[in-house]
Amino acid sequence: PPGPRPPVTTTRTTCGYCGVGCALDVLTEGEDVVAVLPARDGPVNRGHACVKGRFAHAFRTSPERLTRPLLRRDGRLEPVSWDEALGHVARGLRAALAAGGPGAVAAISSARATNEENYLVQKFMRTVIGSNSVDNCSRLCHSPSAAGLTAAFGLAGGTDSFDDVERADCLLVAGANPADAHPVVGARLLRRVLGGARLVVADPRAVGLARHADVHLRPRPGTNVALFHGLAHVLLAEGLTDEGFLRERATGLPELAVLLAGYPPDRVEAITGVPAADVVAAARLYGRAGRPAILYGLGVTEHLHGTDGVRALANLAILRGAVGTGRGYGVNPLRGQNNVQGASDMGALPDLLPGYQKVTDPAARERAARVWGSEVPREPGLRIPEMFAAARSGALRALWIVGEDVCATDPDATRVAQALEACPLVVCHELFLSETARRADVVLPAASWLEKDGTFVNFDRRFQRVRPALDPPGEARADFAIVHALAGALGADLGCPTPAAALAECARVAPLFAGVSHERLDREGALHWPVPDPDGPGQARLYTERFATAGGRARLAARPYLPPGEEPDGDYPLVLVTGRRWAHYNSGGMTRRTGNLRLDGTDRLDLHPADAARYGLRDGDPVTVESRHGRARLVAHVGDETAPGQLFCAFHFPSSGVNTLTSANADTVTSCPEYKVTAVRLLIDSEP
Ligand code: SF4
């Protein structure tokens, strides 16, 4: 007879999928997940969760889960012991250092990993290797937010708490599809709109929220900056600005006014395709609201001029005095991955130490060196695209990738694969044999978010606890333990033996987080950064009296609209935009190994009925998409979500090869890829 059933244990943790940061109660019975319940007292989700956080956990016990280290021998990855794998990595790192110095080693840390793991990775790179060449995938999504918001207001976070949405009377949602990509945020936004807030949606696609918009602005992909300047033009022309705020708390108005004179609504219509009357109507809604708020997503940042897009949105809030005043709720990025904010907060960036302190600032380096007992290199390191270029050129001899499937998710994927093949040592932490892991020399089996201890920072700057509901399977280890083991293999000791100790140490290095600790989070719940004081509260609103710029004023930016890197032409007449679907998450490594696969089983190409008719395509037909960079095989999905001439697809199924299509064009300030504009053509009846 079966023995007694183990008791059900409930573990409160934070969802490991998107950046909303839903609090979840994971119910386990022995090694089984019985249920995942959204926490009613979750500060962001308040009893809600989406199809990913709630149901997509079967990946944990997938037979494909990696449970032993793998080492490449004679071209094949073979299971080996941890000692053997770590010994191989240590020898490879020493060889790379001997051949090329610290500049020959780079690390890609992870927005999926905890804060403590990111903190440890950057500390390893800076103190053990002696290089600032550590980056994370915010490079590929919201690095323009960090750059743009810092330039405008002084700090690299959204200006307000998401709770302020409940107080806003007008929402401008730009380049985001929260109904699919951030479903709990989408639901809360919709509830506010149904409760009476006015809604302006700026997105080329008829995304879910657009059905409820007072005005839906549909700019041609790549023309956001002109559209936002058009809105700002109307604010100025119709006296919808806050003159007292502009006089006392902002800089740059004369220069911006000169620039905006060149963006009347009819010119904006010519550039963007948005009717001039809609530009005026949207500007009046935002301009006349008592408490407007701006939320935006990757449709603003993933462009050749993504940072300019963020600055142009910030201009709107500054012109209205709707930031740092309580008369509006600023400019707020909807972050994509569970801990993409935290990975950057922790200093997994080539130019910034924990807490956004510049590596070029001697005082910041000294503060970190005092705590770490080691010099901090002063030269900024390589960004992710520069790492791949250095690998292809032979300058980079060891690349350490913590849980990112760069071969599936980075742009121009064919050249990414070439970079990995050219690099003498590629080490990868992974749950599964991803496209990247297949090309690695050493694959280290890692724990998932359900098996980890630490913290994440969500999209509105909340530190929240992550607690292990289960042990990792087999010999898999948390990234935290793997980083320590790698340091040990090189004869180094990183200190901070536990995640709690790592966050406590980070609090000593980064004044922005000085008051954060596991103990405090366990006792008080979530905390918004900045938390400068162990006894003081976190700051839900980033700015009140002053901004964090040198002079304490918000900065308007007079940057002209510049065209995207690729535009349709006779050879490639269509524009492809990529993004996410509701049931899956990024490369799909986890969600494809769950029942969510039955909800959505393939990457589809959305196209307008007019384009479908032109190419003789019907719903469900196979179709090959070709760009100047590669080819992808997809299934046609005909509908009017996309405008004529525009296509949309996700990148959840690496076998479809979507990111071989996207180009190496990138934001001129931050190197964030231009995922949102790729010129393509359709090949009918053509095999890839
Ligand atoms: Fe997880 Fe995001 Fe869904 Fe919340 S909305 S359950 S954080 S994936």
Image: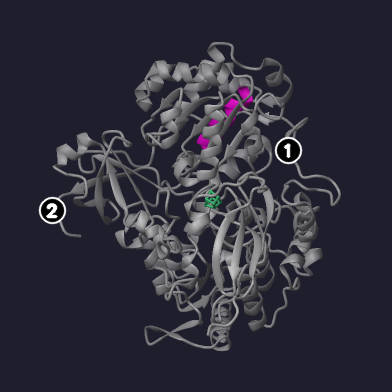
Give coordinates of residue 231: x percent, y percent: 50, 22
Quick check: 642 above or below 526? Answer: above
Instruction: Decide: is 110 above or below 481.
Output: above
Which residue is at the far front?
1
**Foreground: 133 or 323?**
323
Please provide percent x and percent y for residue 638: 25, 41
**Range of residues picked out in magenta:** 308-319
Closer to the camera: disc 2 or disc 1? 2
Residues at discs 2 and 1 in contact (Cβ within 8 Å): no
Residue 349, picture quadrant:
bottom right
Q: Tell me what residue is drawn at x 32 percent, y 54 percent.
A: 603
Asked if the magenta segment contains residue 318, the reply would be yes
Residue labelled with disc 2: 685
Q: Label 1 belongs to which residue?
A: 548
Query: Is residue 213 located in the magenta-colored stretch of the structure?
Result: no
Residue at the extreme top: 238
Residue 685 in the figure: left or right of residue 609: left
